[in-house]
Image (spheres, helix red, strand yellow):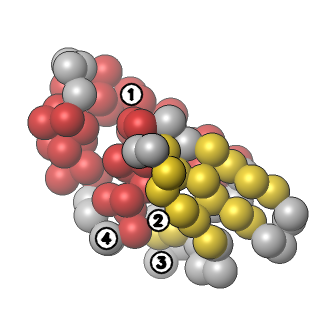
Amino acid sequence: MQVKKNLAFQIISGEAFIVDSEKSMLHNLNETGTLIWKNLLKGKEKKEIISNMLKNFNVSEKEAKKDYLNFLKELKSKNLLEEE
């Protein structure tokens, strides 16, 4: 999966704001979502993203994996990701 093309985003005070102009939607990500989003933009794989989550947040590996998968599910449901 990769971030859908033609999305605009800006990081303000550590949180990402994503604009989907196709659907006229604005999405606001929290700090964890922003970290995952930035890693997805860089083409990072699941293992590396979870490792970055563990380095940046006080969470267990199990919790980081769960948060990662739930976040991807949410991005997919909002059509913010596409197949590579």
Compare marks 4 and 3 and give the one earlier in the sequence: 4
At horizontal 68% and vertical 49% (from top left) the residue drawn is 27
> Horizontal placement of 30 versus 24: left or right?
left
Compare residues 19 and 67 and report the one nearer the observer: 19
Q: Which residue is mark 1?
A: 66
Label 3 to label 2: alpha-carbon separation = 6 Å
For residue 74, which quarter of the picture? Answer: top right
Q: Report if the CB atoms under discs 3 and 2 are less than 8 Å apart.
A: yes
For residue 58, which quarter of the picture? Answer: top left
At horizontal 60% and vertical 53% (from top left) the residue drawn is 17
Q: Secondary structure at mark 1?
A: helix
Q: Which residue is mark 3?
A: 84
Compare marks 3 and 2 and give the one earlier in the sequence: 2
> Horizontal placement of 27 versus 29: left or right?
right
Q: Which residue is mark 4?
A: 42
Q: Amino acid at mark 2?
A: Met
